[in-house]
Image (cartoon, rainbow, N blue to C red):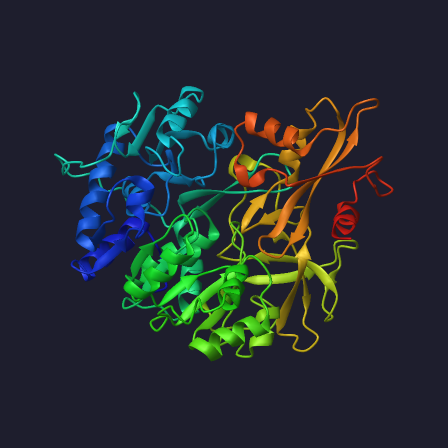
Amino acid sequence: MSGNSRWDDDFRARAAERPNAVAVVDPANREALLGSPPRRLTWTELDTEVDAVAAVLHEHGIGADDVVGTQLPNTVELVIAYLACARIGAIVSPFPMPYREYELTQLGAVAGLSALVTVGEFGGRAHAAQARAVADGLPGLDTVLAWGPELPAGVESLDALPAPAKPVPHIQRHPADVVTLCWTSGTEATPKCVPRDANGWRVIGEGCAAAPQLTADDVILSPFPLVNMAGFGGVFMPWLLTGARLVQHHPFDLPTFLQQIATERVTYTLAPPALLTGMLNAPGLLDAADLSSLRVIGSGSAPLTGRLIREWRDRFGIEVTNFFGSNEGVPLISDQFTVPDPDARAAYFPWFGGPGLSWPNPASIGVHTRLVDLATGEEITKPGLPGELRVTGPTIFSGYWGGVGDPFDAEGYYRSGDVFAIAEEDPRLLRYVGRARDIIVRGGMNISPAELEDLLVEHPAVAEVAVVGMPDELLGERTAAVVVLTPGADPPTLDEFVALLRERMIASYKLPERLEVVDALPRNPVGKVLKRELRERLRA
């Protein structure tokens, strides 16, 4: 599968190889979510619908290097939108479904959107009307398209499109041209925009497909929002490169998830550790489920345990692959072939790009990594000492959109902000230590504390605020706000904070779930707030 990658060329190749095979399947509960029955498209049918949407975009003047925002659930339309953009050379910027006007306006301005594609309604929210409101406030965003009935004025329907009157121009893109702009929360208040090219996605996709040994005969179930590294690298690219069947799922619903595994004969899917643990611990749940087709589950975003991997293998014959990655392109993959022992696989990753090391996974080819002591800047070569993972190679992006910040060190390595240590038991492996960056991960969704702090400090009773993550067994972390009051002010309530953020139309998963009032925030000698100390207080 290695070589240069152009998404439209890859898609056309799969459609030519497997014209009558089913390519993509809707969520089983689509009708309850969107009011229309689920669809199953063959590669030929998918190609036809891609052509029709590409023609509409082209008619609106969208072409090479124009940025098209998408806010779509995991449905067949999501795949159609991505491939239609690729067909005309446009860049896709996918937004998660929970984003509201605040995030879409803020990030849409950074990306420079020319069009926005969404659905009429989903989950009780009028997404098409929301997109129209965003477009009215963003210069250059002239085109809003949507699937769904009864769309508001100014939103053009993509339902039941006729075949294009004339062929859509075939744009021959270079494999290094940008195809996606994904979003990542950092220590800055505004999420950073990560441009990725087709070749970079291909390398990551090949690595993610190699771990479960995916082929055209596989059926992939996609329960994670297909908007970032996990979606593109772990699902979309393996599907596009192999010609497997893609079964969509959104939002997550456990009965529907298990039903799809059984009825679609799913062979590979993704699930966070908390879900894998919860399913094992639920009395009788998996005894009543048909998992006989499932070979491998990919997991990540939180620590795994050896017991978890072992129980899935021993009870059901299902292997669990441990993934670690970022939108910027850091892929580490620990699977049953490279790290057979479940305890080691849960705790360690093959040291891709380590000095003198080579691995069979294609995502490791051309990658160079090193660990750097954040205090001294010295490279770490001894096991057991924590250091920031720094990476260079074909999987790493070229820099943030718009030149925001410099993510590379003096030697050109990407500063990941993730801390690892060389395993003392086996120096070919890396052990994950923690995040150097101040990110809260709630149920797999990244939350920027700085973004919330900038909004919460607007409350008149707040002199200072620090937002930190507190441990949670189910979601990994929940958000807590620690506040120093303005002299003489009455303490605000958590409900007041939530109301303030809701007024700004911020995504619900970012809302704080705990409020603590303190006399002063702990700081180090140079004045930086010691958030680790705050987290320890909350944990206690």
Quadrant where the N terminus sits is bottom left
List the single residue furthest toward the front.
283
- Residue 337 in sight in this render: yes
Q: In this view of the protein, which residue sits in the foreground, 513 or 8?
A: 513
In percent of the image, x 42 and y 44: which residue is there? 180
Q: Return the x and y of residue 376 as percentages of the image width and height.
A: 79, 55
List the single residue furthest toward the right.
525
Q: In this view of the protein, which residue sits in the foreground, 33 or 46?
A: 33
Residue 200, above or below 385: above
Q: Which quadrant of the figure has residue 185?
A: top right
Q: Return the x and y of residue 292 as percentages of the image width and height.
A: 35, 73
Q: In this image, 202 relative to 153: left or right?
A: right
Q: Return the x and y of residue 467 as percentages of the image width and height.
A: 69, 39
In percent of the image, x 57 and y 46: which residue is there? 446
Q: In this view of the protein, which residue sits in the foreground, 39 or 232?
A: 39
In percent of the image, x 50 and y 60: which residue is there? 275
List the single residue furthest toward the left.
165
- Residue 264 in sight in this render: no
Number of numbered discs overlaid on the protein picture: 0
Q: In this image, 34 relative to 443: left or right?
A: left
Q: Return the x and y of residue 514 as percentages of the image width and height.
A: 68, 41
Q: In this image, 29 relative to 327: left or right?
A: left
In percent of the image, x 70 and y 28: which residue is there? 457
Residue 223, above or below 456: below
